[in-house]
Amino acid sequence: MELEMRQVRNILIVRIEGEMDMLRADQIREDIDKKLDNSEIRNLILNLEKVTFIDSSGLGMILGRYKKLNSKNGRMYIAGARPQVEKILYFSGINKLITMYRNEQDVINLQGR
């Protein structure tokens, strides 16, 4: 699993590659929380275009970050989820809480308005 993070204005963009499962969800959470706790970041884009699998631990990690940002009046977005991952996000109901976009640039453009 690889994790790439960069900041654009007050947006943290996190690109995840590989599986988001029980073995990796805690490390992803820790890495993201370090950035969220040590900066003025108010928004988070999770780019899932290279995620091949997600289980309940991955879903829990996503929901936890959503709650964390929501408590700071921030927003969270999901970008680029593959069809099999998108299906799991829809079945779990995450799509009702977190807006999903085709790619991260759409979100950045939206935030720039």
Image: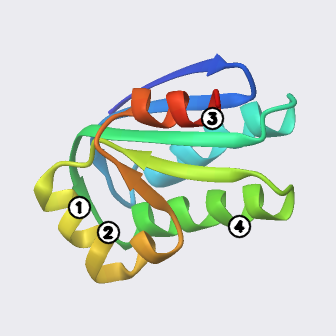
Query: Which residue does the numbered mark 4 point to in the structure image?
Result: 67
Picture residue at 19% right of the left edge, 69% below the top: 87
Q: Amino acid at mark 1?
A: Glu
Secondary structure of residue under mark 2: helix
Q: Residue 41, how many percent across, how many down? A: 78, 33
Q: Which mark is residue 111?
A: 3
Task: Please tell me in which quadrant of the rendered image residue 43 appears.
Answer: top right
Mark 4 to mark 1: distance in Å?
20 Å
Q: Which mark is residue 74?
A: none
Secondary structure of residue under mark 3: helix
> Residue 41 vs residue 44: left or right?
right
Number of disc labels:
4
Q: Nearer the viewer, residue 98 or 5?
A: 98
In the depicted structure, whether residue 34 falls above or below residue 82 = above
Q: Amino acid at mark 3?
A: Gln
* Labels 4 & 1 near each other (Cβ < 8 A): no
* Label 3 Cα crowd, 10 Å radius (few <14 / some 14-19 / many 20+): few
